[in-house]
Amino acid sequence: MRAVPVIAVRRVPELWRRFDVTVRDLPLGLLLLTGSLVPAFHNHGTQLGGLPGRPFDALAVVAVALQCLPLAVRRRWPVVCLALVSVGFAVDQLRGYHSFAGTAVPVALLSVGSHLERHRRATALLFSAAYVPLAVALHRLGSGAESPGEFVLYYLALALPWGMGSWLRSTRAAEAERRRLVAEHTRAAERARIARELHDVVTHHVTAMVVQAEAARYLTAAPDRLDQALTAVTDTGRRAITDLRHLLDLLNPDYGTEARTPAVGRLRTLVEQTRRAGQPVEFTEEGTPAESTGSADLVAYRVVQEALTNALKYAHGSRTSVQVHHGAREITVEVSTDGSGSRAEVAAGSPGASPAASPGGSGRGLAGLRERVGVLGGDFSAGVRTGGGFVVRARIPARSPS
């Protein structure tokens, strides 16, 4: 019973991030507004120019609101936020309110430095120029106790949050560039892997078909052998078409929308095909597929397909279990096969396994699945079970981009 509140608390940050950025920034402005209107904080804020303090009136409330409420748009419209906050700060200082709301000025400067994308230098020059008449007016209206150097020092203090915001912006840009380079490297590696597989398909299957067709020319006098040769050509062609379609599914940019629903629906067909090949398979599918799963459903289908193919190769006739669960945020797949595990070790690429036991597996299938699941941010594992047999498990986020 205690687990439910814990889960609810953990989901609060996720739910909060779904709100618009203006809604998420508004509480800061409201908090600063409330604190500035508390009588104990009156005349305890920023004091520039040496003007004597003045009791709060209706104009003071307006000045405080101009400094606090625009913080709600500090990330959406940072220049508008800084302009309104600056006007409120100027009224605050020229009237001598010296409210706690002056804290909004460095916050607005930090937001401009961090979130403004264009006309950054022009904005800095414009607001720097606007600071000069404010400093001159405060110096004339004040007691004269403050020297011009103190106004310069305050200007430099205001430049600090702007610089911090610029540093944050450059850090985010560097991280975005790093992720872009990683994504490009991943795509290049995937293209190279597909190119290698395509080369294998073409050189193996098509070459075999050409050789078999050439040999069939000399078998016209032996109808039985001619029929066997043509059957071999047909079977090889079908295998080539199947492999090429698999690669085209990866290369086609629209495969995520075309194959999403069929991939899930074809799981039962895939299991039935495996059963007809002599493999006893127990299939369990739970949950309802999410409306938007990206390429997760297709990857889940590939995991089941590769696992059943390995079961046919290395544990033919052994009992196999396929369990697929569709959750709200992820798809989990588990395919386990009973058996001694020696041939499964070959499928997994175990160092202690004998290569002679393998009927020709290259080990690329599981490695490719591990890469594809990893790209989507999921987890993939394949190995020999303690009691014998082999198990493949995959956890695939359902809303990962293609």
Image (cartoon, rainbow, N blue to C red):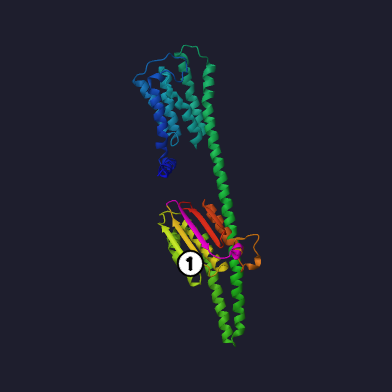
Note whether 299 is above or below 69 in the view shown: below
- From this view, report whether residue 388 is shown above or below residue 327: below
Q: Residue furthest left?
A: 58
**Residue for badge 1:** 281
Say which residue appears at 47% left-offset and 60% top-offset: 323
Question: Looking at the picture, which amino acid does disc 1 mark?
Answer: Val
Give me the residue at 46% from left, 55% from top.
Answer: 331
* Residue found at the very far bottom of the displayed protein: 221
One can see residue 33 in this view: yes
Q: How many numbered marks, from 0 up?
A: 1
**Which of the two residues, 177 or 380, is positioned nearer the viewer here?**
380
Counting from the top left corner in percent of width and height, residue 297 is at 46, 58
The magenta segment is 328-345
Q: Quadrant of residue 263?
A: bottom left
Which residue shows up at 60% across the image and 75% down it? 210
* Residue 402 visible, this angle: no
| Magenta-span inclusion, residue 213 | no
Residue 199 sits in quarter: bottom right
Residue 307 screen position, x and y as percent: 53, 63
Q: Is residue 204 above or below residue 182?
A: below
Q: Nearer the viewer, residue 185 or 34?
A: 34
- Residue 337 on image: x %, y %: 53, 64
- Is 335 in the magenta? yes
What x and y, as percent, mark residue 268? 44, 65
Circle 1: element type:
strand
Is 161 placed left or right of 29 in the picture?
Answer: right
